Amino acid sequence: MHPVLLHLGPLEIRSYGVMLAAAFASAAYFAMWRAEKFGVPKEALGNLLTWVVVSGVLGARFFYAAFHWDEFRGHAWDVVNPFQGGRIGIAGLTWYGGLILATGAGILYLRARKLPLWRTMDLIAPSVGLGIFLGRIGCFLNGCCFGRPSELPWAVVFPPESPAGSVFPGVSIHPTQLYMSLYGLIIFGTLLWAERFRRWDGFTFWLLVMLYASARFLVDFVRYYEESMQVHLGGTVLSVNQVLSIGLFLVGLGMQVYLGRRR
């Protein structure tokens, strides 16, 4: 774990922000590199990616705030304000919130510009896997999005000043950030490989949704969540994100069937 890379006077350059920027930049570059293959104008794609990044960060922040409102009570502006406590950076993001709002904003933009909707989404889909791979490394360096106690040989003890260490001081826990980072790399490679079987527009994007939902559902069994992020279903306790994963997997499967039959 290494949350602060360097200090420039009063300014902290934090590893989470650097890795998040690297994730967005790498994903955007890879998508732009593939634009010609999919017949999407690079200028329009660049504008789309700007909308997706901004709406994704806002959606991730709003979703986090909805389940952690006590952190923002009395200073609600911090939900959208990147200057928290006098420090630059956005802390508190939930990936599913970003996915949902970014997808909605992307669809509205593509419809308004009369660009091929699902073909463009297929173009972007592998880039999302690449972004997950890099972004989750930032989570590991920051000590957030951590797992539950574990005795596995690769379990990690985080410093007490980190989010993970403050909850589990001196305790070995699952490095769930690295699990999701590895899944992101697997998703990236799987989507590129699966493109050879692409027979309809939307195939790659909805496969991304199904793969991520499956990965997130599995990893969340060993990830730590506060009580506000847990759902009790009879004798089973699931995270809110696991419930969303089930729903999104079914939506992805349904869209594959619908788009395939429509073709």
Image (spheres, rainbow, N blue to C red):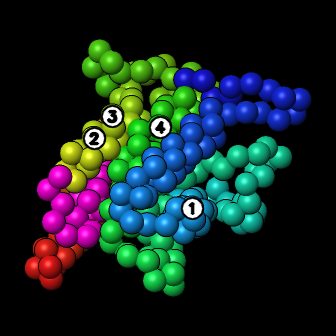
Dot in front, 1 or 4: 1
Pointer 2 residue: 189
Specify the amino acid type for callout 4: Leu
Secondary structure of residue under mark 3 = helix
Give above or below for 160 relative to 38: above
Secondary structure of residue under mark 4 = helix
Dot placed on the residue nearer the N-terminal end, 1 or 3: 1
Secondary structure of residue under mark 2 = helix
Pointer 1 residue: 46
Magenta range is 196-220
Question: Separation of disc 1 and disc 4 at Cα?
Answer: 20 Å
Question: Separation of disc 3 and disc 2 at Cα?
Answer: 11 Å
Residue farthest along the top direction in this orientation: 153
Residue 213 percent location from the top left of the image? 27, 55
Q: Is residue 153 visible?
A: yes
On screen, residue 129 versus residue 141, left or right, reads left
Dot placed on the residue nearer the N-terminal end, 3 or 2: 3
Secondary structure of residue under mark 1 = helix
Closer to the camera in the image, 137 or 29: 29
Q: Residue at x 36, y 57 (%)?
A: 37
Pointer 3 residue: 182
Question: Separation of disc 1 and disc 3 at Cα?
Answer: 27 Å
Residue 80 percent location from the top left of the image? 69, 63
